[in-house]
Image: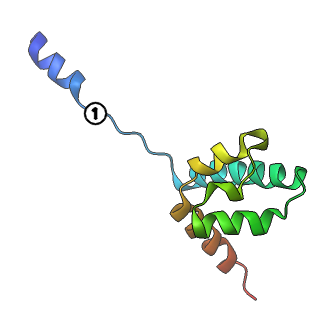
Amino acid sequence: MSDKIKNKMNEKTMTFSLNSEDKNVKMKKKLSHIYNSLAQKGYDPVSQIAGYIVSQDPTYITTHNDARKEAQKLDRDELLKAMIREYLSHPA
């Protein structure tokens, strides 16, 4: 194989995808961190997180323990999907 062909092969973008279970575990860890940080500061974590999800206003989340930075890294659509799946997986 010529060097030119090898270089072309090395230029291709490789994709890597976590399976949805790994994504959910990471999302749950971030959400737990955010929840605990809010609770430590005396906020109602459920209300604050819900307000953030609905409005996307980062001021709903405390900066304590970098919780706001973690919240901004969350994919809100994926979080909502995971929450709905979890909620519906437990019949009333």
Q: Quadrant of the C terminus?
A: bottom right
Asked whether residue 6 is in view, the answer is yes
What residue do we see at 32% from left, 34% from top? 14
Q: Amino acid at mark 1?
A: Thr
Residue 21 placement: quadrant: bottom right
Q: Position of residue 15 (x, y in %)?
A: 35, 39
The front one of 62 and 77 is 62
Say above or below: 14 vs 44: above
Say above or below: 22 vs 13: below
Q: How is the image coloured?
A: rainbow
Say above or below: 30 vs 6: below
What residue do we see at 62% from left, 74% from top? 84
Q: Quadrant of the N terminus?
A: top left
Left or right side of 47 for 26: left
Q: Give the residue at the far bottom of this rendering.
A: 92
Q: Position of residue 24 (x, y in %)?
A: 61, 55
Left or right side of 39 for 66: left
- Helix, strand or loop under label 1: loop
What residue do we see at 50% from left, 46% from top? 18
The front one of 75 and 4 is 75
The residue beneath circle 1 is 13
Q: Residues within 10 Å of mark 1 (few under 14, many from 20)?
A: few
Q: Position of residue 44 (x, y in %)?
A: 84, 64
Q: Position of residue 40 (x, y in %)?
A: 89, 50
Q: How many marks?
A: 1
What residue do we see at 73% from left, 79% from top? 90
Asked whether residue 1 is in view, the answer is no
